[in-house]
Image (tube, helix red, strand yellow):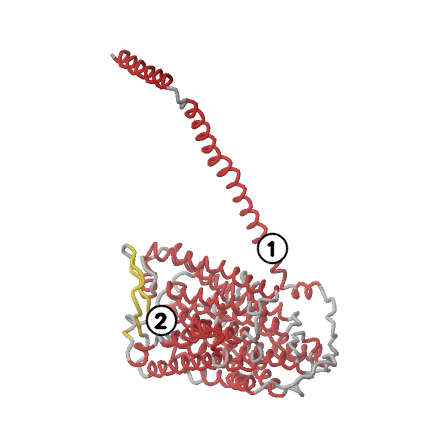
Amino acid sequence: MSLLETSVSLALSAPGAGPAAAGGVASVGWLLIALPLLGAAVLLLGGRATDRWGPLLAVALSWGSFVVGAAITVQLVGHAPEERALQLPLWDWMSVGSIDMSAGLLIDPLSMAFVLLITFVGSLIHVYSLGYMEHDPDRRRFFAYLNLFVAAMLILVLADSYVLLFVGWEGVGLASYLLIGFWNHNPAYATAANKAFIVNRIGDFGLIIAMALMVAHLGALDYATVHGQAGNLSGGTLTAIGLLLLLGACGKSAQFPLQSWLGDAMAGPTPVSALIHAATMVTAGVYLVARSQAIYDLTPDARLAVAVVGAVTLLYGAIVGCAKDDIKKALAASTMSQIGYMMLAVGLGPLGYAYAIFHLLTHGFFKAGMFLGAGSVMHGMDDRVDMRRFGALSGTMRITWLTFGAGWLAIIGFPFFSGWWSKDHIIEAAFSAEGWQGWVFGSVALLGAGITAFYMSRLFFMTFHGKARWHDDAHPHESPLTMTVPMVVLAVGSVLLGVLLYPTGVLTSWLDPVFGHVEGAEPAIPLLAIQLSVFVLMVAGVALAWWMYWRDEVPVTAPAGSVATRAARRDLFQDDANEVFVRVPGEAVMTGLVTGERDVVHGGLVGGTVRSVSGLSSLLRRTQSGFVRSYAMTMLAGVVAVLGAMWVMQ
């Protein structure tokens, strides 16, 4: 048996007999969701009466959810590893025939890792929003939507079944729509919200069909039954479910080919961008695949598709990020690429599950910090987002520069920063895949690391270094404490989180009860060669960006550039492709259906029936003359006809 096969068998045999009933602090785990949901309800239903204190309530309830999550995590730490899965039933949902569905929470190491990320980073974003949205007349509604977003994401990761997960899944979609289009008086922002909502519906269709297949073949949607009986399904059914779940994940996590909404989602206020990209929406797809590991470990084809999607997207996002001059859209492309690394990792199976979650956690800190840093730059630069009109901000925005710099060093994989620990392990795991997959996925991940170092250094240097390129009417200044303190906390996480989680073995031992303990496989090339290659590419990317965007003068107006540059600026023609392959054919189908309904249904079937009934009624109407002699003659004719028929039959 190969080392990879041994790893897979260990992972599949790791989960215990099933989750125990929740007790202690975990018995009030429903408060995790109820607190932010209460905040959203109070602020939305309370109206203008809550304007003054409503945002503070939203912040307090978000932190309250974090405190409950931390307490439950401490309780789980006190249990033996095999006893760290707890079931918290909530209510019986529905009973249809032989199918019984109930709502409940699954509290285990995987869900709690997400809970801590969502509530801690999400609460910091709430605090930041107090300063960022201070003068917005609708900030009460904004904070209500933030609370709703956090509550929906917590439902998603705590659900003990796919049907309850779907409730959170749709709640996240709704909250993102409301927040992306928060300033919907701007038609472009309203369009961006619609785009995100519609693209995600395509992914949701895949998740719905996957659940339908589960019900049809297993008669259940709870994780315990579906994952426990997945081995009884045929290979084709398992592959279909895996691919459909992947389609759902591609929508939420902005992975190829459903990634077109992510850049336009920057229309929302910057704290929304941080929340979507770091702690909530885009991590949902990674969670879905990781939670469904029992399915993917039994269907290599679907798992390979996950890895391919991740590899394509990590390069796609990196290339697009090289050409963006909008600071938020450049960060959005970066998120797309980094989530691609996570999808690649979960597509590697037991070798990559823990590394994917590790990178998801570190990314949550450094990406949230950089988005909040971008918001701080916008706050000090009159809401400008064009990096070509920034430069030399390190002197006037010292805290923003330092905190953003920590995130920059983390994402490019500078040694001992958090991203160095997490992303490099994904690259090493990619090279450890069997056969050709190791060479292909490893090379793609390695190339993506070099491009990441270039475009993120480009962003950092264009914004904070070189010559000042802003207009005379701009007066850059540092942000207030409500904004800078969360940035400092996230910067500390960007520096220390990796070394706290991995060398200590805390994260891997924490996730072992979910994914099983897996020994690392031997990479296709020596480990030292991989590490040196990553470092050399990182240095080369930073050096090239320094040469082009710090040493040389940056044009205020972007030059035309090469064909490749123009393509990257247009997101590699993703909207054009959607127009040709989705909108136009979809419109043609709908036009055909409408025309068919008008001509065939209304004009043929319905119209013909109407004409027949009308003609028959006209004939019958002529017999109703009102003359008694006519009725008598009709009766006589009828009697004669009946008698004649009887005579013939004799």
Viewer-proximal residue among 45 and 514:
45
Q: Give the amino acid at mark 2.
A: Leu
Above or below for 501 versus 450 = below
* Marks 2/1: CA–CA distance: 46 Å
Above or below for 261 versus 428 = above
**Label 1 CA crowd tier, 10 Å (few <14, some 14–19, many 20+):** few
Reading the image, the residue beneath label 1 is 579
Number of numbered discs = 2
Q: Give the amino acid at mark 1.
A: Glu
Location of the C terminus by quadrant is top left
Q: Where residue 605 sits in the image (x, y, percent)?
A: 46, 35
Viewer-proximal residue among 625 and 265:
625
Viewer-proximal residue among 247 and 532:
247
**Do we see residue 413 in this rendering?**
no
Location of the N terminus by quadrant is bottom left
Left or right relative to 320: residue 10:
left
- Residue drawn 74% across and 81% down? 472
Reading the image, the residue beneath label 2 is 10
Helix, strand or loop at mark 1: helix
- Residue drawn 39% across and 20% down? 627
